[in-house]
Each structure stands twice: as structure tokens, then as C-alpha cells.
Image (cartoon, rainbow, N blue to C red):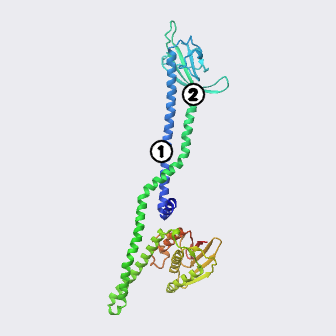
């Protein structure tokens, strides 16, 4: 058996509650992991944008500081500027002390210089950053980051001048966009990764629960197996004593009878626990399959339960006929049908029949078991397949353990058999067993 197939079968052995818990924790972990990654992604984008903007501003300051040491009135073209000073997309504007533009090196910028002023209206010798948008001569919208500062060129007879440097932010915006696109692409594929991580994490969290479940299942199998021998000894001993009850006092005889009844109930419970444990360990590929004559098998089953039905004053009727012989495990079908028929007899009112109807369909052989008992409320219909669960308000016989239908469900889901339930309170219950063929 391959690892994947074995893992899938082991997962099928776990109850729905445990599977549902893993899916719930997977959803919680998926949302949590994605939320954390989303938060940090936004934070990283913000840091990257801030870093690029700071780098741009540093370049503007550097450009202004370098131009402060040059004779800009003699070098008035970008061809004459050193390569380390001037690059494509950059510009230098020189304004006179009165704020009038003297000349521009590089791309043309609007003459919209804003000079910082203090409360007294005097010009401050400090820097000024500004982002401006304008339409160039070709009709293209441009966005430029500028930096202006009042400097002293230290030339004879030359007063303070204002130098404004600018850099086109198109390349900067493209760099930001590329980084954002990469982060967003990562976020689009990350939910699948986060789901896988969350599923594995949920499995790790629930691993102790799974181990305890496996231990409990093993304990049920071992305990029920070990209890068979002492129960058999008790039954044999009480049977021997009850055979001579004429020689015993009446009070002792009653106590022995109570012990015998309790032992029989205990024996039925242990047998059902053992059946349930075997059902959980059952693998269809290891079962012995054969062609089954369903008409003959159901007739034998009806004859076997006829005594029990007569004891309950309930009729047992077999209707219909099946021509095809399904390839399946006879013991499993016998166990499923036995539990359902016993259940139907137990809950049927006196002098009302339990009907076993055989039908042949395209893909299934259908066996319907119908009783005319009190029925099962809709909110209880799914729960009756849970172990030890009893619909108390509909039971007139409290001797059952509540495990018969749990055994039916365990074997049905292992063999591909479908169990359908139709019931209305006061109108009886019908189980339909669909066997693939």
C-alpha cells in the first residue's frame, strides 16, 4: 500500500469532529498568517518608498552642494558640466537675489520658485523641497522633485543667488511600481502557501488529540477482547447455579437471575465494542469478497431474527427479489443488515410488521428496512449514528447500547455502501442500504 493511500485511509478513520476541528484551525491559522504577512508587506512597501524618497532628496542636496562650488555663470550648458554632477532627467535653475530666473541647465522647469520667508519678510538661507507637476513642450505631464537653497557663490561683486535643482521622478516611480507589483504578486499566491502552512500547523496542534484518540480506540479493542473470557466464566457459573435454583433460597435465586441478566447485557455491549473496534480497523482491500445471493442471505437473516420478532410480538416480512449478485464482503453486509433489522424490531409497536424490501436499480442493489414505530425527529436523525446516542423520547426498549448504527456507519463508509434514512415522527422509519454492483 502506498504512503498516500495509507495516509488517506488513516484520515478516514478519524471522527468528523476531529476533521472539522482541523479545518477550523486551518482556517484560523490561514487568516492569521496571511494577515501578518499582509501587514509586513505594507510595512516593507512603505519602508522601500521612504528609502527611495530619502535617496532622491539626498541626491538633490548633493547636486546643490556641488553646483555651489562651480562658476555656473560661465558654465551654462549641460555639455560643459562634469558627468558626476549632471545626469539625464536632472536640471539646475539659477535665480537672482530678487527671484528672477537667470538661466536653466537641463530640462526646462516652470518658473514657479517659492522663496521661504520669515515673519519679517527676510529671505532665509535654508533649503526648500517641492514636488511640482507640469506639462512640457511636447505635451507630456512631468513630475519633478526640486530643492532650492540660497547660496553665496563667493564671486567678486556677486551677491547671493538661489539655486534650484530638480530630478524627474519617473524612474523613481517606476522603481516603486516594480517593487509594489512584486509584493502584490507574492500576496496573490501566498494564500495557497499560507493554507498549506496552516494545514500542517493545525495537524501538529491536533497531533496529541489524534494520538489520544488512537489510544482510546486501541483500548476499546483490547478491553472488549479481554472482557470476553471473564464474562463467559460468569455466564457459565450463573447458568450452572440457576439450573439448580430449586435448591436455593428465593432471594438468592433472584440475585443470580439479576446477575445473569446484567452479564448478558454486558456481553452484548462488549461484543458491540469489539465490532466497532474491528470496523474502525477494517480495510476493504484486505476483505474477502464473493458473489452474494442477496435473496438467500436476507431469508437467512429473517429466519434468525424471527424468534426475536415473535418475542416482541412484531411481524417480519420479506418482499421483492434481486437477480444480480454483488461482489462484496458477506460478513460486513450481514453485520450491517443485522444491526438495522434488530433496530427496527426493537422500536416497532406490537402487531405491526417490519418490512424488508429488495430492489434492483441501475448501479445499486437496494435493501429497504421499514418499521412503523414512533419515528425519529429531523434534528435527531444525524445523531443516531453517533456511538451511545439514544433518542430517548422514541424508545420503548432501553436495553440497547446505542452502538448498532455506529457500527453500520463505520462499515458503510469503508465499503462504499450508502445508508439513507427517511423518518417522520409518528410515521415510522425506513433505512435504505444501497450496495454498489
Residue at screen point 44% across, 73% down: 274
Residue at screen point 48% across, 47% down: 33
Residue 37 horizontal/vertical position (percent): 49, 44
Which residue occupies the extreme bottom position in the image? 246
In the depicted structure, whether residue 387 falls above or below residue 346: above
Q: Which residue is mark 2?
A: 169
In the depicted structure, whether residue 409 falls above or below residue 263: above
- Locate the C terminus by quadrant: bottom right
Which residue occupies the extreme top position in the image? 157
**Left or right of residue 415: residue 235:** left
Q: Secondary structure at mark 1?
A: helix
Q: Is residue 211 visible?
A: yes
Q: Which residue is mark 1?
A: 36
Residue 57 horizontal/vertical position (percent): 51, 25
**Left or right of residue 259: residue 7:** right
The image quarter in which residue 224 lies = bottom left
Q: Secondary structure at mark 2?
A: loop
Amino acid at each position: 500500500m502506498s504512503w498516500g493511500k495509507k495516509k488517506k485511509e488513516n484520515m478516514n478513520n478519524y471522527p468528523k469532529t476531529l476533521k472539522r476541528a482541523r479545518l477550523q484551525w486551518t482556517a484560523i491559522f490561514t487568516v492569521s498568517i496571511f494577515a501578518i504577512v499582509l501587514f509586513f508587506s505594507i510595512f516593507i512597501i512603505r519602508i522601500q518608498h521612504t528609502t527611495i524618497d530619502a535617496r532622491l532628496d539626498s541626491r538633490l542636496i548633493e547636486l546643490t552642494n556641488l553646483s555651489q562650488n562651480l562658476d555656473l555663470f560661465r558654465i551654462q550648458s549641460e555639455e560643459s558640466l562634469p558627468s558626476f554632477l549632471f545626469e539625464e532627467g536632472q536640471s539646475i535653475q539659477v535665480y537672482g537675489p530678487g527671484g528672477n530666473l537667470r538661466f536653466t541647465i537641463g530640462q526646462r522647469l516652470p518658473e514657479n520658485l517659492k522663496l521661504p520667508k520669515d515673519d519679517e519678510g527676510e529671505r532665509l538661507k535654508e533649503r526648500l523641497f517641492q514636488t511640482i507637476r507640469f506639462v512640457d513642450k511636447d505635451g507630456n505631464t512631468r513630475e519633478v522633485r526640486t530643492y532650492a537653497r540660497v547660496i553665496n557663490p563667493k564671486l567678486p561683486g556677486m551677491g547671493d543667488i538661489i539655486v534650484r535643482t530638480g530630478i524627474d521622478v519617473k524612474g523613481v516611480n517606476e522603481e516603486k511600481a516594480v517593487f509594489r507589483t512584486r509584493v502584490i504578486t507574492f500576496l496573490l499566491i501566498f494564500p495557497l502557501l499560507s493554507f498549506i502552512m496552516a494545514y500542517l500547523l493545525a495537524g501538529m496542534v491536533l497531533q496529541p488529540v489524534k494520538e489520544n484518540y488512537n489510544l482510546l480506540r486501541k483500548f476499546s479493542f483490547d478491553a472488549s477482547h479481554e472482557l470476553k473470557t471473564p464474562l463467559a466464566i460468569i455466564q457459565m457459573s450463573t447458568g450452572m447455579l440457576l439450573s439448580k435454583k430449586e435448591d436455593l433460597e428465593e432471594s438468592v435465586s433472584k440475585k443470580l437471575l439479576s446477575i445473569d441478566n446484567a452479564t448478558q447485557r454486558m456481553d452484548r455491549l462488549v461484543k458491540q465494542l469489539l465490532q466497532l473496534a474491528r470496523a474502525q480497523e477494517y480495510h476493504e482491500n484486505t476483505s474477502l469478497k464473493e458473489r452474494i445471493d442477496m435473496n438467500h442471505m436476507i431469508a437467512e437473516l429473517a429466519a434468525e431474527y424471527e424468534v426475536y420478532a415473535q418475542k416482541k410480538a412484531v411481524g417480519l416480512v420479506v418482499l421483492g427479489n434481486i437477480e444480480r449478485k454483488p461482489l462484496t464482503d458477506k460478513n460486513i453486509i450481514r453485520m450491517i443488515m443485522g444491526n438495522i433489522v434488530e433496530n427496527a424490531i426493537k422500536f416497532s409497536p406490537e402487531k405491526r410488521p417490519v418490512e424488508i424490501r429488495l430492489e434492483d436499480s441501475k448501479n445499486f442493489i437496494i435493501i429497504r428496512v421499514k418499521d412503523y414505530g414512533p419515528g425519529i425527529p429531523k434534528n435527531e436523525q444525524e445523531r443516531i449514528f453517533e456511538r451511545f446516542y439514544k433518542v430517548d423520547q422514541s424508545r420503548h426498549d432501553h436495553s440497547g447500547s446505542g452502538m448498532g448504527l455506529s457500527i453500520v456507519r463505520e462499515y458503510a463508509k469503508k465499503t462504499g455502501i450508502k445508508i439513507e434514512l427517511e423518518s417522520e415522527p409518528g410515521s415510522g422509519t425506513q433505512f435504505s442500504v444501497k450496495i454498489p454492483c
